[in-house]
Structures are given as structure tokens and as C-alpha cells.
Image: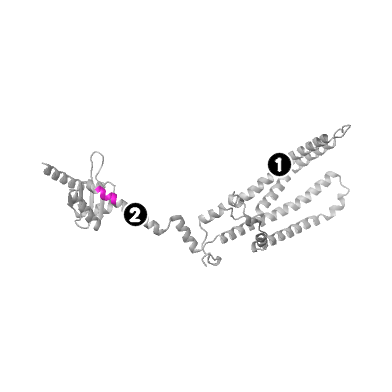
Amino acid sequence: MAGSTDNRSEQPTRRKLEKAREKGQVPRSKEVPLAAVLFGSTVLLLYFGQTMLKKLQLVLKSSLVFSVPAELTIPWLSGMLNTIALHTATVVLPVILAAMVFSIAGSAMQGSFVLSGHALGFRFEKLNPKNGIKKLFSKNGLMELAKSVALICVVALISYKVVSSHLPLYPRLILMDVEKLVFWTASISYEVVIRVAVFLIIIAVADFFFQRYRFMEQQKMTKQEVKEEFKEIEGDPLIKGRIRRLQREMSRRRMMADVPTADVVITNPTHYAVALSYKMESMDAPRVVAKGVGFLALRIKELAQQHGVPMVENRPLAQTLYKTVEIGESIPANLYRAVAEILAYVYKARAALSR
């Protein structure tokens, strides 16, 4: 079958990839944005975490030190909670916005930041549970499930190793004040998170190249699809050939219409015919208005004879003009003298006839 996957041996064309991109189909690894968010947020908290902690402590202290009115009312409680939430948001919001930026950057790094109306469009088949189950238990779905389970296991193993490496410290945490307790808790958590982030970056890079390879394999085309796309872009060769024939016919008709306006027709005498026109007031040099070989040459000579256009036999000049000068072009400088002699002869002959 032409569309069979087994026959997809051709690399996808640029147009095929552009169409896939318009539909939102691009090589994308879900782990890349996740790794970018986790690693970026961890580094951000490493440098600004202490400052944020101090600000949160100030917010907590200011929220605990307040004068209680004689009568507690809903508006008063609501105002107090709104103030606490606003102060907390000013501390936490920059980290949330940074995480969003890291996520967008992770997608952009893959070249897969695409806004596609086709992908966002509503389709009823998406609501079909059967399609959802097929997708879940498909080869791709099972692979993603296995990858997620493996990732959870590795993260759990990293966390266990880090936590277990600090076992002698845990009994002493009970005797520490709040500040030291927070410090050690944050240090252990940071150690876990940074190791997980580094591991996730390695997995994300590997998964990105795997997803790219799989995407290119899925986009491969059959030889027939390549031919059909070429026809779509360039047009059907039969239609193009017909258009070219029509264009040549129209050009030939325009050329034949210019023969009666020529000043002279230079012949081979039988095989070649080149019609020249020269208007001193508008042309710098004589111009070829028509040319032909074989049957077309005979037709040019017939028209010239019907309209009284002089014909001069000059075999070398006729062949040179036919081979080197296109219709509508002026003759080259190296032929000026030869053509000038012929035009001078024609003009003298006309002058003699008009007397």
C-alpha cells in the first residue's frame, strides 16, 4: 500500500514539516521545560532564598503583632487576611513568574513554541473515551508511562540517598532553635532538589533528541507522497507543458505580427530567417523582431513577401543572429558593420524605387 509505514523511506520535505508545525506537531520533550523550571528555580532560591525568607519572617511578625478591636468583625478579619496575602504575594510572586519564564524558555529552546489554532480547536473525537483508552495503551502511551515510573523511582532513590547520608543529624534537630532547624531543612532539601534537577537535565537532553528522532521517523514520506507534493508545489508537468506550449504559441503570434514592421529579413536562404527593425529616433541599434528556422523561417519569409519587406541572403550573418540574439534584443556591437551595410543597401534600394 502506498501509504504504508514500511514504504516511508524518504526524508520529510520542508513543506511537510511546515504543515506539521501549523498543526502544532513538533518534536517536543515534556522533560525539558520541567528540568528548566526545577533547575532555574533552585538556582534562583539559592541566591535569593535567604532574602525571601527574611521578608517572609517580617510578614509573619507583622501579621502576628496587631491590636485586636473590641469586637471582631468580618470586614476587619478580611482586611487583615488580604494584607497578609498581599505582602506574601510580593515575596513569592517573583519566583512564580520566574518559573513561568523558565518553562517558556524550555519550550523555546526546543524550537517548539508554537501557537496553532488547529491544535487548540475543538473536535468531538477528543471526547470519545475509546480514543483516550487507545492513546493511553498505545506504544507511545506505554513508553511515556514507563518513563514516568522510571523517573519517579530514580528521584526516590536520589532522595533516599541524600536523606540517609544525614541520619546522624536528625536526632539533634529536636534541640535546635527554629532558625537552625529551617537552615538544615532547607540545606537537605536543596541538596535533594539540585541533584534531581541535574539528573532531570540529562534525561531531558536525551529525551529531546529521542523525540526529535521519532518525530522525523513519523514524518517520513513515501516516494509517491514526495511526487504528489512536488506536483502540488510546482504544478502538474502535463499542465505546465501545456501552459508553456500556449506561451510559445502566443509569443510566436506576437513575433509574426511584428514581421510586417521589419526593415529587412536576413535569410540563409532556406533554413534561417531573421527580421530586423531599426528606428533611428528610438533605437540605439537594430533590433531582432522575429526569427525562425525551418518551417518558421518559411513563414517569416512569406509574411515579408506579402508585406513588401526586403529579404537579403547572408548565410553567416543569418545563422549568427539566430544563435546569439534573442527576440526583442538589439544586435551586438561586433555585428554593427555587417548589419549597417545591409540596411544601407535596403535604404538605397527603397530610395531608388521611390523615384
Assign a secondary structure to mark 2: helix
| Left or right relative to 37: residue 262 | left
Q: Which residue is mark 1?
A: 94
Q: Can residue 127 be seen from the camera position used here?
A: yes
Tag 1 and tag 2, C-beta contact below 8 Å: no
Using a 10 Å C-alpha cutoff, classify the residue at mark 1 as few (fewer than 14 neighbours), some (14 to 19) or many (20 or more). Answer: few
| Left or right relative to 114: residue 246 | left
**Front one among 259 and 276:** 259
- Majority secondary structure of magenta residues: helix
Q: Is residue 119 above or below residue 8?
A: above
* Mark nearer the viewer, 1 or 2: 2
Q: Amino acid at mark 1?
A: Pro
Using a 10 Å C-alpha cutoff, classify the residue at mark 2 as few (fewer than 14 neighbours), some (14 to 19) or many (20 or more). Answer: few
Which circle marks residue 246 in the picture? 2
Q: Residue at x 25, y 47 (%)?
A: 258
**Is residue 21 part of the magenta span, yes or no?**
no
Q: Amino acid at mark 2?
A: Leu
